[in-house]
Amino acid sequence: MCGIAGIIHKKAGKGVNIGQQMTSMLQALKHRGPDSTGYAMYGKDNGNQILRFKVAEAADLEGSYDIHAIIKDRLETVNSRLTELGVKVVKKESPTEYAHRYEVEFSGDMKKVADFVEDVEGVEILSIGNSLELVKDLGDASVVSDQYGLNDFNGTHGIGHTRMATESDVDIRSAHPYWAYPFSDVAVVHNGQLTNYWTNRRSLERSGHRFSSNCDSELIAVYLADRMSQGDDLETAMKGSIDYLDGVFTYLVATKDQLGMAKDVMAAKPMVVYEGEDMIALASEEVAIRTLFDHRIETFDPYHGEVKVWQN
Amino acid sequence: MAELRKETSQEMGLHDEQLKGRTQKKFFSIDESENLTYFHSFDVDTTKSATIDALDMTPREINREIRELMEKGIGDITVDNPMSRHGVGVGILNRLNLTFSDSLGYFGCGLIDGPNVHIKGRVGWSCAENMMAGTVVIDKNAGSTFGAAIRGGDLVCKGSVGARTGIDQKGGTIIVGGKTGAFSGFMMQRGRMIVLGDAGMNLGDSMYDGTIYVGGEVEELGVDCVQADMTELDVRYLTEKLALYGMKTPRGVEKMQKHTSGKMLWNYANLEPNEKKLIL
C-alpha cells in the first residue's frame, strides 16, 4: 500500500510550519504503511548547502557490540574526506547517532563530494540541496518528527511517505523519499509497484547513475535526474515517465520551487488533491488533507496518466 | 449481431434487461417474506429524526451510533462532520434516510440494502461497494471503483468519478454527472451505467452483459464492448431515470451512446444453488 502526501504554499513569505502540517497528514496515513516515515521539506535557502547523510542503519545499533566505534570511525572518515575536498562545514547537527545534518560552504562539484563520501562503507547521502531537508527513519510520523525535531520546521513545500514494505527491507535505505542524485533539491515519493525496475535500472547504471537501494521507487528519482540532466524540465521529464515506467504508481516529486504529481495510465493508485488559492495539498486519502482544515473543502481525484506541476 | 439463444434462465426473466429488475419479478413473494428479513435490520419511522456530531468519533463509533438510533426506531439520521473517514454508513439493511453533511473516505455506504443516503460532499474509493438496494446520492466527486460489484439500487454521483467505476457491476444503476475514468464497467455483468460526461479508456472492458450509456466522448472501448443502437425504450428510461435526480445531459439523451457486450460471454444458464431452489 504506502501513503504519500505533499503540500505547497504559493504565498509562504517567510515560510509556514510545514513540518507540523506534513506530520499531521502523514500520521493520518499511518494505516497505509507503518514501517517507516520520510519527509522531504524545503526551508529557507541561506546560501549554504545542506548535506543529510547516515552512517549506519537504525537496526545496526542493536546488531553489533562495536557498532558505536564503527559509527565514530565512519563519521571521522566522512569529515576528513570533506576537508580533503575543500568543503567547509559551518554547522553540524546529529538528531540520532547514525543520521547527520551538515550545513556546508562549497562551490565546487557536489556530485564529486557525494561520490567520495558515499565511498565510505555504510555511509549514504540522503540529500544535498540549498533548501531540501530529507529525513527518513523507522516508525510513524509522530516518532520520526519528534526524533528529528520536525514540528517547528518552517518552509514553503514538502512531500512525505509512510511505507508498507513489500519488495525490499524495512530499513532507512529502502524508505522514501529518494533524493534524485546528483541533482540538488530534487526528491521523490512513490506509492505502487514498478515491474520494469531491473531492466531500467541496469540501463541507467550503464549510463553512470547510482542506486543506493533495491527499492523500485528509487528508479523514478534516478530516471527524473537522468532526463533533467539531458535538458528536460520537470514537467517534461514527468510526462516521459508515464510511458517509461511499467506497473502501477502515483508519485510526487519536489524541487526547490515546484511540486509535481504523476499517475499511471490505469489510475491504480489513489491520490486526492485540494487546490486552494494559497495552498495545494495532496494525499493518498482525503482524510489526511482534512487534518489541515476545520471546514469543508473541495477536492478531486486526478485522472489516469495525468501529470500536474505547481510552482510556489 | 445474431439473435441470442433463449436459455431457461432468460425465459424466466433473469437477465432480459427488463426495467422492473429480475428480483422484484421473481423473488420477493409475500409467502417468503420471513426469509427476506435480515438479522440486524430495523423497523424505523422516517418521521423521527436525529443528528450525530461525528467530529471526534471513530468510524466504528459512528456506525454503532447509527445502529443504536435505528434500534430506537429513528428513520431520519444526519451525520455532521464525518471528516472524510473511511467505512462509515456501512451494512445498513433496512430503509432509512441517512444524510452526511460532508465528505466520506473509502468504502462509504458499502454492503447496504435499502437506505436512501445523501452525501453532501465527495466520497473516496469504493463507495457503495456491493450495494443491494436503496439510493446513494453524492453531491460532489467520487474516487475510483465507484459502485464496485453493486447488485441493485441507484448510485448517483453528480460530479466526476475515478477509474474502474462499476467494476464487476451485477445489477442496479450507476449515474455519473461528470466524467468517468479508465476501465469503467470492467467485467460488468448486469445493470446500467449512465455517464453524462466523457468516459476514459477501455470502457466496458471484458464486460459480460449490462448497458453503458455515455453522453460525452469515449476515449476508447475495451475488449468485448461494442456500441449499440439507442431505442425508444432507452430514451424513455434515461429521461425518467435522470429526472428522478434532477440531472440532464446538455446534448439530450437521444444523442447518448449506448454500449453493450459484443460477445455472448455469460454462463447464466448455470444458476446459483439458491436460485435453482427458488425456480426449479
Image (cartoon, rainbow, N blue to C red):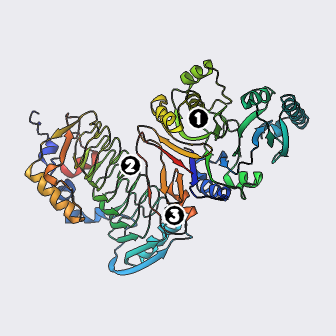
Q: Secondary structure at mark 1?
A: loop
Q: Earlier in the sequence, mark 2 or mark 3?
A: 3
Would you place residue B248 above or below residue A186 in this image? Answer: below
Type of amino acid under label 3: Pro
Which residue, as the protein is rendered here, is positioned at the far top? A206
Which chain is mark 2 on? B
For the residue pair A13 and B195, the one nearer the viewer reads as: A13
Q: Residue at x 51, y 69 (%)?
A: A295
Q: Which residue is mark 1?
A: A217
Q: Residue at x 68, y 30 (%)?
A: A212
Q: Residues within 10 Å of mark 3 (few under 14, many from 20)?
A: some
Numbered label tally: 3
Is residue A100 visible to the viewer in this orientation of the structure? no
Q: Which mark is residue B162?
A: 2
B75 with respect to B79 (left or right): left
Q: Are marks 2 and 1 in contact (CB under 8 Å)?
A: no
Q: Tell me where residue A36 appears, x and y as whole percent.
A: 67, 45
Q: Which residue is mark 3?
A: B59
Is residue A188 visible to the viewer in this orientation of the structure? yes
Q: Secondary structure at mark 2?
A: loop
